[in-house]
Image (cartoon, grey):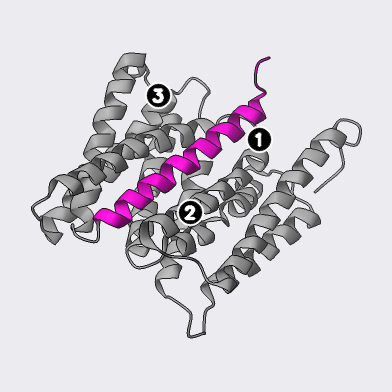
Amino acid sequence: MPLSENLRGILLMCASMAAFTINDTFMKSVTQTLPLYQTIGLRGLIAVVGLGLLVLATGAFRFRPNGRDGWLILLRSLADVAATILFLEALLRMPLANLSAILQALPLAITLGAALVFGDRIGWRRMTAILAGLVGVLIIIRPGTEGFDRWALLGVASVVCVVVRDLSVRPMQGQVPSALVALGAAVAVTVMGWVGASFQGWAPMSAPEAGKVLGAGLFLIVGYLTSVMAMRHGDIGIVAPFRYTSLLWAIVLGLLVFGDLPDLWTLVGAAIVVGAGLFTLWRERRLRLHRASQPGLQG
Protein backbone atom coordinates (compact mmCIF):
# COMPACT_ATOMS: atom_id res chain seq x y z
CA MET A 1 0.00 0.00 0.00
CA PRO A 2 1.58 3.35 -1.02
CA LEU A 3 2.31 5.89 1.70
CA SER A 4 0.16 9.00 1.88
CA GLU A 5 1.86 12.33 1.28
CA ASN A 6 1.46 13.29 4.94
CA LEU A 7 2.89 10.01 6.24
CA ARG A 8 5.80 10.25 3.80
CA GLY A 9 6.51 13.76 5.06
CA ILE A 10 6.32 12.63 8.69
CA LEU A 11 8.80 9.77 8.16
CA LEU A 12 11.18 12.06 6.28
CA MET A 13 10.97 14.64 9.07
CA CYS A 14 11.76 12.02 11.73
CA ALA A 15 14.75 10.80 9.70
CA SER A 16 15.91 14.37 9.22
CA MET A 17 15.80 15.11 12.95
CA ALA A 18 17.78 11.97 13.78
CA ALA A 19 20.44 12.79 11.17
CA PHE A 20 20.80 16.43 12.21
CA THR A 21 21.04 15.55 15.92
CA ILE A 22 23.76 12.95 15.30
CA ASN A 23 25.57 15.55 13.19
CA ASP A 24 25.23 18.05 16.06
CA THR A 25 26.72 15.51 18.45
CA PHE A 26 29.76 15.02 16.23
CA MET A 27 30.15 18.78 15.83
CA LYS A 28 29.86 19.57 19.54
CA SER A 29 32.45 16.90 20.29
CA VAL A 30 35.03 17.87 17.65
CA THR A 31 34.75 21.64 18.20
CA GLN A 32 36.00 21.14 21.74
CA THR A 33 39.47 20.70 20.20
CA LEU A 34 39.24 22.18 16.68
CA PRO A 35 38.33 25.76 15.64
CA LEU A 36 34.63 26.13 14.81
CA TYR A 37 34.94 27.57 11.31
CA GLN A 38 37.61 25.09 10.28
CA THR A 39 35.22 22.33 11.29
CA ILE A 40 32.31 23.94 9.44
CA GLY A 41 34.42 24.29 6.30
CA LEU A 42 35.69 20.71 6.35
CA ARG A 43 32.30 19.24 7.18
CA GLY A 44 30.72 21.35 4.48
CA LEU A 45 33.26 20.17 1.93
CA ILE A 46 32.23 16.59 2.61
CA ALA A 47 28.56 17.51 2.29
CA VAL A 48 29.13 19.43 -0.96
CA VAL A 49 31.03 16.52 -2.52
CA GLY A 50 28.39 14.01 -1.46
CA LEU A 51 25.47 16.12 -2.59
CA GLY A 52 27.28 17.07 -5.80
CA LEU A 53 27.72 13.40 -6.70
CA LEU A 54 24.05 12.81 -5.97
CA VAL A 55 23.04 15.74 -8.16
CA LEU A 56 25.23 14.38 -10.96
CA ALA A 57 23.81 10.87 -10.59
CA THR A 58 20.23 12.09 -10.75
CA GLY A 59 20.86 14.53 -13.58
CA ALA A 60 19.61 17.43 -11.45
CA PHE A 61 22.30 19.75 -12.87
CA ARG A 62 20.36 19.70 -16.14
CA PHE A 63 17.49 21.46 -14.40
CA ARG A 64 17.43 25.20 -14.85
CA PRO A 65 15.35 26.93 -12.18
CA ASN A 66 13.30 29.91 -13.29
CA GLY A 67 14.07 33.30 -11.87
CA ARG A 68 11.65 32.96 -8.98
CA ASP A 69 12.91 29.54 -7.91
CA GLY A 70 16.50 30.72 -8.22
CA TRP A 71 15.85 33.55 -5.78
CA LEU A 72 14.06 31.17 -3.41
CA ILE A 73 17.04 28.79 -3.47
CA LEU A 74 19.34 31.74 -2.70
CA LEU A 75 17.09 32.89 0.15
CA ARG A 76 17.01 29.39 1.61
CA SER A 77 20.80 29.11 1.37
CA LEU A 78 21.43 32.46 3.09
CA ALA A 79 18.95 31.60 5.85
CA ASP A 80 20.75 28.29 6.31
CA VAL A 81 24.09 30.08 6.66
CA ALA A 82 22.70 32.36 9.38
CA ALA A 83 20.99 29.46 11.17
CA THR A 84 24.20 27.40 11.09
CA ILE A 85 26.37 30.15 12.58
CA LEU A 86 23.90 30.98 15.34
CA PHE A 87 23.18 27.37 16.19
CA LEU A 88 26.79 26.17 16.33
CA GLU A 89 27.95 29.18 18.33
CA ALA A 90 25.24 28.31 20.87
CA LEU A 91 25.99 24.58 20.72
CA LEU A 92 29.62 25.20 21.67
CA ARG A 93 28.49 26.71 24.97
CA MET A 94 25.23 24.91 25.80
CA PRO A 95 24.22 21.32 26.57
CA LEU A 96 22.85 19.58 23.49
CA ALA A 97 19.48 18.78 25.05
CA ASN A 98 18.95 22.36 26.30
CA LEU A 99 19.52 23.82 22.84
CA SER A 100 17.37 21.12 21.28
CA ALA A 101 14.59 22.00 23.72
CA ILE A 102 14.58 25.56 22.37
CA LEU A 103 14.40 24.23 18.82
CA GLN A 104 11.16 22.42 19.66
CA ALA A 105 9.43 25.76 19.11
CA LEU A 106 10.06 25.34 15.37
CA PRO A 107 6.77 23.57 14.51
CA LEU A 108 4.78 26.32 16.19
CA ALA A 109 6.91 29.05 14.64
CA ILE A 110 6.53 27.49 11.19
CA THR A 111 2.76 27.17 11.64
CA LEU A 112 2.59 30.87 12.59
CA GLY A 113 4.94 31.79 9.75
CA ALA A 114 2.82 29.91 7.21
CA ALA A 115 -0.23 31.82 8.41
CA LEU A 116 1.53 35.19 8.17
CA VAL A 117 3.31 34.61 4.86
CA PHE A 118 0.99 32.29 2.93
CA GLY A 119 -2.34 33.15 4.52
CA ASP A 120 -2.92 29.69 6.02
CA ARG A 121 -5.94 29.92 8.28
CA ILE A 122 -5.18 29.67 11.97
CA GLY A 123 -7.86 29.95 14.62
CA TRP A 124 -7.82 30.78 18.29
CA ARG A 125 -7.05 27.22 19.43
CA ARG A 126 -3.84 26.91 17.47
CA MET A 127 -2.93 30.51 18.27
CA THR A 128 -3.32 29.61 21.95
CA ALA A 129 -1.01 26.65 21.38
CA ILE A 130 1.57 28.95 19.78
CA LEU A 131 1.41 31.32 22.76
CA ALA A 132 1.75 28.36 25.13
CA GLY A 133 4.82 27.27 23.18
CA LEU A 134 6.28 30.75 23.62
CA VAL A 135 5.76 30.43 27.37
CA GLY A 136 7.55 27.08 27.23
CA VAL A 137 10.54 28.65 25.47
CA LEU A 138 10.67 31.42 28.09
CA ILE A 139 10.71 28.77 30.83
CA ILE A 140 13.62 27.04 29.08
CA ILE A 141 15.77 30.17 28.67
CA ARG A 142 14.53 31.89 31.89
CA PRO A 143 15.50 35.49 31.11
CA GLY A 144 16.31 37.60 34.15
CA THR A 145 17.23 34.63 36.36
CA GLU A 146 20.54 33.17 37.50
CA GLY A 147 19.90 30.18 35.26
CA PHE A 148 19.63 32.40 32.19
CA ASP A 149 22.26 31.73 29.56
CA ARG A 150 22.61 34.51 27.00
CA TRP A 151 23.76 31.93 24.47
CA ALA A 152 20.22 30.56 24.50
CA LEU A 153 19.20 33.72 22.66
CA LEU A 154 21.37 32.58 19.76
CA GLY A 155 19.32 29.39 19.75
CA VAL A 156 16.12 31.43 19.54
CA ALA A 157 17.57 33.48 16.67
CA SER A 158 18.49 30.29 14.85
CA VAL A 159 14.85 29.20 15.11
CA VAL A 160 13.80 32.35 13.24
CA CYS A 161 16.34 31.64 10.50
CA VAL A 162 15.19 28.03 10.13
CA VAL A 163 11.58 29.23 9.76
CA VAL A 164 12.69 31.43 6.85
CA ARG A 165 14.70 28.54 5.40
CA ASP A 166 11.87 26.03 5.51
CA LEU A 167 9.09 28.34 4.36
CA SER A 168 11.16 29.40 1.35
CA VAL A 169 10.83 25.84 -0.02
CA ARG A 170 7.05 25.88 -0.20
CA PRO A 171 6.55 28.26 -3.16
CA MET A 172 9.05 26.35 -5.34
CA GLN A 173 7.78 24.55 -8.39
CA GLY A 174 7.36 20.81 -7.84
CA GLN A 175 9.98 19.89 -10.44
CA VAL A 176 12.88 21.62 -8.63
CA PRO A 177 15.14 18.70 -7.53
CA SER A 178 15.50 18.43 -3.74
CA ALA A 179 19.18 17.52 -4.14
CA LEU A 180 19.82 20.77 -6.01
CA VAL A 181 18.15 22.82 -3.28
CA ALA A 182 20.18 21.00 -0.60
CA LEU A 183 23.41 21.48 -2.57
CA GLY A 184 22.83 25.23 -2.78
CA ALA A 185 22.54 25.45 1.00
CA ALA A 186 25.59 23.22 1.54
CA VAL A 187 27.74 25.35 -0.78
CA ALA A 188 26.71 28.56 0.98
CA VAL A 189 27.47 27.17 4.45
CA THR A 190 30.79 25.71 3.28
CA VAL A 191 31.94 29.01 1.78
CA MET A 192 31.02 30.73 5.04
CA GLY A 193 33.11 28.16 6.95
CA TRP A 194 36.22 28.63 4.80
CA VAL A 195 35.96 32.41 4.94
CA GLY A 196 35.57 32.29 8.72
CA ALA A 197 38.50 29.86 9.04
CA SER A 198 40.76 32.27 7.17
CA PHE A 199 40.25 34.71 10.06
CA GLN A 200 39.93 32.29 12.97
CA GLY A 201 42.89 30.14 11.97
CA TRP A 202 43.52 26.42 11.46
CA ALA A 203 44.74 23.64 13.74
CA PRO A 204 46.31 20.22 12.98
CA MET A 205 43.73 17.43 12.98
CA SER A 206 44.13 13.97 14.52
CA ALA A 207 42.61 10.77 13.11
CA PRO A 208 39.76 10.67 15.68
CA GLU A 209 38.95 14.32 14.93
CA ALA A 210 38.93 13.59 11.20
CA GLY A 211 36.54 10.70 11.83
CA LYS A 212 34.16 12.96 13.72
CA VAL A 213 34.23 15.57 10.95
CA LEU A 214 33.55 12.83 8.39
CA GLY A 215 30.65 11.50 10.45
CA ALA A 216 29.20 15.01 10.80
CA GLY A 217 29.47 15.55 7.05
CA LEU A 218 27.77 12.28 6.15
CA PHE A 219 24.87 12.79 8.54
CA LEU A 220 24.56 16.39 7.38
CA ILE A 221 23.99 15.11 3.83
CA VAL A 222 21.17 12.88 5.03
CA GLY A 223 19.71 15.71 7.10
CA TYR A 224 19.80 18.19 4.21
CA LEU A 225 18.04 15.86 1.80
CA THR A 226 15.36 14.58 4.14
CA SER A 227 14.67 18.10 5.47
CA VAL A 228 14.00 19.48 2.00
CA MET A 229 11.95 16.44 1.00
CA ALA A 230 9.90 16.49 4.22
CA MET A 231 8.77 20.08 3.69
CA ARG A 232 7.64 19.22 0.16
CA HIS A 233 5.42 16.30 1.15
CA GLY A 234 2.16 16.73 3.01
CA ASP A 235 0.88 19.73 4.91
CA ILE A 236 3.35 21.87 6.86
CA GLY A 237 1.01 21.92 9.86
CA ILE A 238 1.06 18.11 10.01
CA VAL A 239 4.69 17.39 9.12
CA ALA A 240 6.42 20.16 11.10
CA PRO A 241 5.40 19.01 14.63
CA PHE A 242 7.44 15.84 14.19
CA ARG A 243 10.55 17.92 14.67
CA TYR A 244 10.03 17.22 18.37
CA THR A 245 11.66 13.80 17.91
CA SER A 246 15.01 15.60 17.85
CA LEU A 247 14.62 16.29 21.57
CA LEU A 248 14.52 12.58 22.33
CA TRP A 249 17.71 12.05 20.32
CA ALA A 250 19.36 15.05 21.98
CA ILE A 251 18.59 13.87 25.52
CA VAL A 252 19.90 10.35 24.83
CA LEU A 253 23.01 11.43 22.94
CA GLY A 254 23.72 14.28 25.36
CA LEU A 255 23.70 11.82 28.24
CA LEU A 256 25.67 9.06 26.50
CA VAL A 257 28.33 11.25 24.88
CA PHE A 258 28.65 14.30 27.15
CA GLY A 259 27.06 13.14 30.42
CA ASP A 260 24.58 16.04 30.31
CA LEU A 261 20.97 15.96 31.43
CA PRO A 262 18.61 18.94 31.16
CA ASP A 263 17.39 20.34 34.47
CA LEU A 264 13.79 20.14 35.65
CA TRP A 265 12.73 23.57 34.33
CA THR A 266 14.17 22.82 30.91
CA LEU A 267 12.19 19.59 30.80
CA VAL A 268 9.03 21.40 31.94
CA GLY A 269 9.45 24.05 29.26
CA ALA A 270 10.21 21.44 26.63
CA ALA A 271 7.12 19.45 27.63
CA ILE A 272 4.95 22.57 27.20
CA VAL A 273 6.46 23.32 23.78
CA VAL A 274 6.16 19.73 22.56
CA GLY A 275 2.63 19.45 23.95
CA ALA A 276 1.62 22.61 22.11
CA GLY A 277 3.14 21.22 18.92
CA LEU A 278 1.29 17.95 19.30
CA PHE A 279 -1.94 19.86 19.84
CA THR A 280 -1.45 21.64 16.52
CA LEU A 281 -1.01 18.24 14.88
CA TRP A 282 -4.22 16.90 16.43
CA ARG A 283 -6.11 20.08 15.58
CA GLU A 284 -4.93 20.06 11.98
CA ARG A 285 -6.10 16.49 11.52
CA ARG A 286 -9.49 17.31 12.97
CA LEU A 287 -9.83 20.34 10.73
CA ARG A 288 -9.03 18.29 7.66
CA LEU A 289 -11.79 15.84 8.53
CA HIS A 290 -14.37 18.63 8.85
CA ARG A 291 -13.17 21.09 6.22
CA ALA A 292 -15.07 19.54 3.33
CA SER A 293 -18.41 19.63 5.12
CA GLN A 294 -17.75 22.82 7.08
CA PRO A 295 -15.53 25.02 4.89
CA GLY A 296 -15.80 27.95 7.26
CA LEU A 297 -14.28 26.06 10.18
CA GLN A 298 -11.12 27.60 11.62
CA GLY A 299 -8.53 26.31 14.05
Is 37 above or below relative to 64?
below
**Residue tagged 1:** 235
Camera-nearest residue between 73 and 60: 60
Question: Residue 296's spot in the image, x, y percent?
Answer: 87, 41
Camera-nearest residue between 73 and 240: 240
Range of magenta residues: 1-30
Question: Residue 267's spot in the image, x, y percent?
Answer: 59, 66
Q: In the drawing, does residue 50 fall left or right of residue 253?
A: left
Q: How many marks?
A: 3
Type of amino acid under label 1: Asp
Q: Can you tell which of label 1 and label 3 is closer to the viewer?
A: 1
**Residue tagged 3:** 65
The residue that appears at 64% across and 25% down in the rendered structure is 5
Judged from this view, the residue extending furthest toward the right is 293
Type of amino acid under label 2: Val
Q: Earlier in the sequence, mark 2 or mark 1?
A: 1
**Residue tagged 2:** 252
The residue that appears at 45% across and 23% down in the rendered structure is 176
